[in-house]
Amino acid sequence: MHTMATALTLEPTALPSDAIEVGRIADAWGLQGWFKVQPYSADPEALFSCKRWYLQPAARGAKAFGGTVLLPIRQAKDHGGMVLAWAQDIDDRNTAEALRGARIFVPRSSFPSPPPGEYYWVDLIGLQVINRQGLALGQVRELRATGAQTLLVLAHEQDGKAGKRMIPFVPAFVDQVELPQKRIIVDWQPDY
């Protein structure tokens, strides 16, 4: 007996203004429409807590849809560094395979609150970094995991030239993260 695969019909929508890219769909998993997600975080809580994912097509390869579409999630669970997900109207392997490569976005407002003293990297991007003496050291452009520690990578200007400064994001150097004030206070000097 041959059964016809479900056609992929996803609701076109606008990407929320606070959308953050959190992963991509890697492949189908099983026969019932589940699919594997490669999260961009070691702790993909945003994927588990949000039941409405926004997809955009892969940058290259086959595209089963265009623009931004809404994907209501029935269930998502951890699977050894990957996330397994099952979505509304995705009920067979062929339909799940059509999503391969899609980029997944969720609204930042749907992220669970981190424990005290912990931060989502996305919330640190753009913050001003100043030292204890009030000297501006730069603006956070990225965070870089180096294995031993995470580094704040700052953009700054020195003598009219754009520069880069790296500060370990560890308690020995970071005194306070003040998200409402959009700043990080550090024990660091510009000549380190």
Image (cartoon, rainbow, N blue to C red):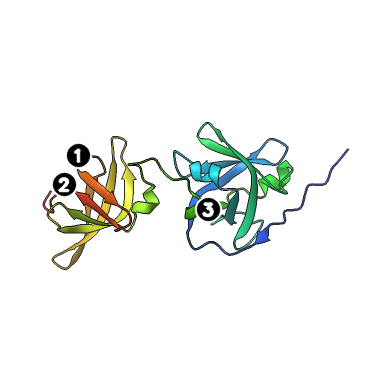
Q: Residue 187: give its label.
A: 2
Q: Earlier in the sequence, mark 2 or mark 1?
A: 1
**Residue 20 screen position, x and y as percent:** 47, 54
Callouts 2 and 1 close, C-beta under 8 Å: yes
Q: Secondary structure at mark 2?
A: loop
Structural crowding at the residue carrying mark 2, measured as other residues with C-alpha within 10 Å and reported as few (<14), some (14–19) or many (≥20) = some
Q: Residue 172: give its label.
A: 1
**Residue 10 screen position, x and y as percent:** 68, 57
**Relative to 146, does residue 132 appear above or below in the rendering?**
below
Residue nearest the observer in this picture, 47 or 33: 47
Structural crowding at the residue carrying mark 3, measured as other residues with C-alpha within 10 Å and reported as few (<14), some (14–19) or many (≥20) = many
118 left or right of 110 in image: left
4 left or right of 158 in image: right
What amino acid type should be assigned to the residue bearing mark 3? Val
Q: Residue 106: give its label.
A: 3
Residue lying at the far right in this picture: please name it.
1
